[in-house]
Image (cartoon, grey):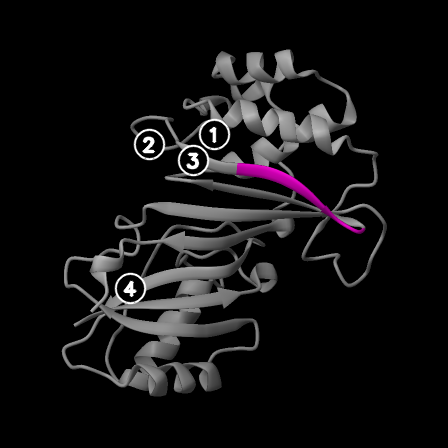
Amino acid sequence: MRYFLEISYDGTAYHGWQVQNNASTVQQTLNEALSTILRCEISTIGSGRTDAGVHALNQVVHFDLSDEVNTDELCHKLNRLLPRDIAALELRAVTDEASARFAAISRSYLYRIHQHKNPFLELRSYHHYRSLDIDLMNASCEVIKNWTDFESLSKVQTDVNHFNCQIFDARWERYNDEIHFHVSANRFLRGMIRAMVGTMLLVGEGNINLDTFEEILASRDRTKAGRSVPAHGLYLKDIIYPEDIYI
């Protein structure tokens, strides 16, 4: 049987999601815990990779088992074995062909910014002290919601066949001292969200206007866009799948 497992993690101590040689990763830690509990080799497939320092409120992985398991009991055992910075949220049986990576119809991310020094947010939010015009940044969100080719915001060396993404939602919201960026799409390119935030910050600071922002997107040139903001402010927030994959 195939199962979808929802997990959350603080990415501070890890070199990203994906298994790497000589590096501690979330996937490797999860694989080892599942293999220990189930007494067989388990290799999970994630909905996507998160870079070093990036967090997840909800990451989804799938793995296969020869026998049916008690999902609540397995989640309980996992949480007892996993380190404190990784939590198992829910385990659900799915159809045999369901893929955590390829069956997703929407992915959502959150980027957190705080504007006054706060030691409790240091590794979980980006400290950006400059004044920002949220209205202008939300105007830039309207631009990207009507855009499709995001090559300007993608890492240069990537193995994708195209740079088209459909943005379903993009918005900035203020929460007291924090500013949150919410974005959802059918897919994201490597480094896209951190480059997008970095470029929107230029708009919010008044360093570029909306016309220039649109020209950057049209240029398909990563060097024209803003810098990539730090990884520790980024959270994988949610992944949506068709309901008919669940058993």
Residue lying at 68% horizontally and 43% vertically, measured from the top left: 173
Query: Marks 2 and 3, how far apart in space?
Result: 8 Å
Q: Which residue is mark 4?
A: 62
Label 1 and label 4: CA atoms lie apart by: 27 Å
Q: Is residue 24 toward the left or the right of residue 178 in the image?
A: left
Q: Position of residue 46 (x, y in %)?
A: 35, 57
Q: Are marks 2 and 3 in contact (CB under 8 Å)?
A: yes
Above or below for 97 versus 92: above
Q: How much space separates mark 4 and mark 3, taking CA atoms?
A: 22 Å
Q: Earlier in the sequence, mark 3 or mark 1?
A: 1
**What residue lies at 63% left-to-right and 13% top-to-bottom?**
212
Q: Is residue 219 left or right of residue 124?
A: left
Q: What residue did someone put label 2 on?
A: 160
Mark 3 is on which residue type? Leu
Q: In x, y percent, where is residue 58? A: 47, 61
Q: Which residues are magenta?
A: 170-176
- Local packing at callout 1 (Cα closer than 10 Å; few below 14, some 14-19, many 20+) is many
Precedes in sequence: disc 1 or disc 2: 1
Label 4 vs 2, first from the N-terminus: 4
Q: Secondary structure at mark 3?
A: loop
Of 159 and 24, which appears nearest the observer?
159
Secondary element at tag 2: loop
For label 4, the crowd category at 10 Å Cα-Cα, with few meaning under 14, some 14 to 19 and many 20 or more, is many
Q: Quadrant of the N terminus?
A: bottom left
Would you call the spot at circle 2 few (<14 residues within 10 Å), some (14-19), or many (20 or more)?
few
- Mark 3 = which residue? 189
Q: Secondary structure at mark 4?
A: strand
